[in-house]
Amino acid sequence: MKNDAIKSVVVLTLFSIIVMVLLAGINTVTAPRIAENEYKKMMDSLEGLIPEVSGEDYEQITDLSGYPESVQNVFVDKNGRGIAIIFAVTSQYSSGDMKYSVGFDNQGKIVAIKQISYMESKSFGNYYESFVGLEETDAADVEIFGGVTYSSNAFKSGLNDAFEAFKITNSK
Amino acid sequence: MKNNKMKILTNGILKENPVLVLVLGTCPTLAVTTGIVSAISMGLATLAVLVCSNIVISALRNVISDKIRIPAYIVIIAGFVTAVQMLLQAFLPDVYDMLGVYLALIVVNCIILGRAEMFANKNSVVDSALDGVGMGIGFTLTLFLMGFVREVFGNSTFAGIAIPFLAPFKLPILTSAPGGFFVYGVLIALVAIFTKGEYPKKKSFGCEGCPSAASCAKAQAGIPCDGAKAEESEVADV
């Protein structure tokens, strides 16, 4: 009886270790490619985010200390036409898989939002587009999307962080 | 011998179709069949996981004791699902984005765990691989069929390509959840008509195929299962 229990623990532990090692091997092959894909998607989302600003016009802010946690990247137009912020938030189920790029003009008004990834079980369609043209105070008044409340709240929380990141960047 | 292998392979396509006859894997079936491309992608991802997990579980069936079989199966299946996720994210990112959260949910797909319990842990590696291929093809074909009906008649497109002459007649409800249930029900009915309702009854699997065999007093005593009433009295006797 005792031997059975020990054998069971050993077998399960061995299985877990073997699976872990195999996945680590696959990860070493796929991780660089995944990072490359993510970077490409992010750079594609910057194209046309702020009118007349293309990818090479941006300068990336590398030091994000003091920025909200959900803010992953901040890009400033070298010619001072606006700021692009990338944020990723978590809803009820997944882990940081709602990712958006937000373009701000110099007055802090949202000029465009693009969806980079959305891994939730239920879509809220183009809900994020209802924030375009709004400033921080107006954006807070936009109601959440009925039936997709967790994802809507997560998006609004990420957008608040983007406004915060805009203010930090502007003050520098 | 050859016929037996062929029977194992073809069982999952119609006679024991995992979705339309065994009614397993209903959640992804309803969720991803709003489009043909997502339906086929989910079908193929599940097929890959099903074949690999069936092979490994069958090969290790003498190592995995009865008490730890469920956690052991979950570790193996979750490993393959994670591998498929990483490979799709790296090499087919559009498909990965399309399947979204449902890709990870393959881990808890009843078809995979069901086949591990009912077939792979009692049969040879080759037979289990064939069962995985057959069930996977049956699942993929069903998803394709549902995706075809829901996308073509609900959205008047085929794999995203517009079909203009169908546009005035499209039924948008087919792309929503009630429409999914409706198409699913109709397909189940059609398969029942086609197979004359001869779906496999529980007792036809025998005690070897019964997931409860390990904990069933009657199975332990070697008494054949012959219905609920008999089961009650015989278990009392045992």
Image: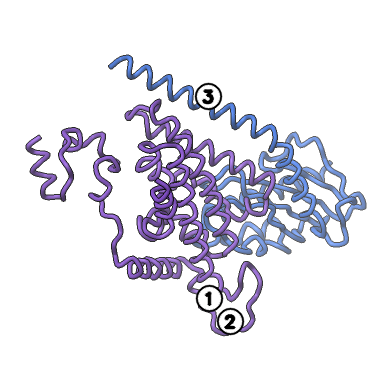
Chain colours: A blue, B purple
Residue labelled with disc 2: B166
Amino acid type of the residue tagged 1 in the rendering: Phe
Identify the amino acid type marked 2: Leu
Say whether marks 3 and 2 touch (CB < 8 Å): no
C-beta proximity under 8 Å, tags 2 and 1: yes
User: For the residue labelled by badge 2, is the local secondary structure a helix, a strand or a loop?
Assistant: helix
The answer to which of marks 2 and 1 sits earlier in the sequence is 1
Is B57 situated above or below B140?
A: above
Above/below status of A2 relative to A122 = above
Give residue A17's mark: 3
For this rendering, which residue is in front, B43 or B4? B4
Instruction: Give residue B38's position: percent from left, percent from top.
Output: 58, 59
- Which is nearer the eye, B137 or B215? B137
Dot 1 falls on a residue whose secondary structure is helix
- Between the residue at mark 2 and the residue at mark 1, the CA separation in whole angstroms equals 7 Å
Chain at tag 2: B
Which residue: 40% across, 51% down? B3
Q: For residue B213, which quarter of the picture?
A: top left
Q: Is residue A116 above or below residue B170?
A: above
Residue under the point 89% across and 50% down? A56
